[in-house]
Amino acid sequence: MKQSFTVRQGALDGIEAFLGVAKHRNFRRAAAELGVTPSAISQAIRALEARLGATLFIRTTRSVGLTEAGAGFLSRAKPAFEELIAAGETARDLGRRPAGLLRLSVPRAVLPVLLQPLIASFCKAYPEVEVEIATSEELIDLAAAGFDAGIRMGQFIAADMVAVRLTPPFRLVTAGSPAYFGANRRPQRPDDLRHHRCIRLRRSSGAVGSWTLNDNGRAIEIAVAGPLIANDFSTVLGAAIEGVGLAQLPEPIAADPLRAGKLVQVLAPFAPTAPGVFLYYPAHREIMPKLRAFVDHAKSHSPAMRRSRTKTA
């Protein structure tokens, strides 16, 4: 069985010296091009030949030529080394300017409310950045899954993440369709929810969340029940509009259906406040220019920043 050559640490040492000598057929000219001494070139070539177990050059007092092994090695080493140089230049270029693929993990419900206008303006401002959006309700490991950043509501972001506010805090509204209230009395107090069909949300942890309401500054938990459990706000919203039951929704998501009369808000005095939506990314990772550009763009175009500018104007 033929034994393959194993690339070990330092296996690329001497390759550049070899290519320089093969190009010029002269140790001194290769040394001058690389900015080293001829003796350093000779040592690098000898070390490479010893590591390969083959003589690469035929040396005479007048000329330097390639052996058969050297010619074969050159035919494969030269394009491979050039590809490595090109790969290095590409990586260096991506480290200098906003370019390349930017992958974002985003809850589905955030897209139409917040992210679509933001992404549209970002793509126009940075045409060399390709944006990929993966909708997911799960709290995934960004680095392990190959994402540059994620977008979530604030209370679901781990402490070791850098968080950038995209929206001001907002209320969680309780609402149902006109058809639902045509057959059911409107709740007047939080305890009334125990007698209503409620659409519940399953968290990424697997737990079905209870509803939180605000009773004169005191947070109260209500264990609601109902015919439907969903794992994203988009499904909860659609089911509420269809009259399946009551839903507790972030106000930005429920705003348009409320204005259009597709939903009716109840228990408004008891609506709690959620922290808002945040862009987040690992604190320990060096931030690439493409992500830095998106973070800066998100800061300047987010509703939170616009509201801040309005207040200070």
Image: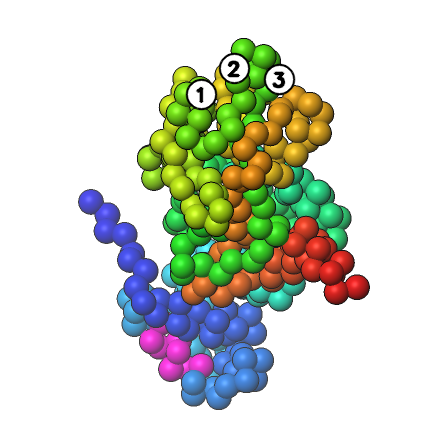
Q: Amino acid at mark 1?
A: His
Seen in the picture, residue 123 relative to 50 is either above or below; the reply is: above
Name the N-terminal-most of marks 1 and 2.
Answer: 2
Percent position of residue 251, x then y: 60, 38
Q: Which mark is residue 184?
A: 2
Q: Is residue 218 left or right of residue 3?
A: right
The residues tagged by marks 1 and 2 sit, at their Cα atoms, a distance apart of: 8 Å
Say above or below: 219 vs 9.
above
Position of residue 262 in the picture relative to residue 46 (left or right) = right
Answer above or below: position of 228 versus 121.
above
The magenta stretch is 41-48
Q: Residues within 10 Å of mark 1 (few under 14, many from 20)?
A: some
Visible residue check, residue 297: no
Distance (Cα) linking label 2 and label 3: 10 Å
Which residue extends farthest right? 313
**Residue at image location 48% in from the left, 37% down from the top:** 136
The residue at the far left in this view is: 1
On the picture, is 255 further left or further right than 77? Answer: right
* Amino acid type at image mark 3: Pro
Which residue is tagged 1?
196
Could you classify mark 2 by the number of other residues whose Cα lies within 10 Å: few (under 14), some (14-19), or many (20 or more)?
A: few
Q: Earlier in the sequence, mark 2 or mark 3?
A: 3
Kind of residue indicated by mark 2: Asn
Q: Which residue is mark 3?
A: 178
Which of 141/94 is in front?
Answer: 141
Marks 3 and 1, Cα distance to the nearest angstrom? 14 Å
Residue lying at 39% horizontally and 48% vertically, measured from the top left = 141
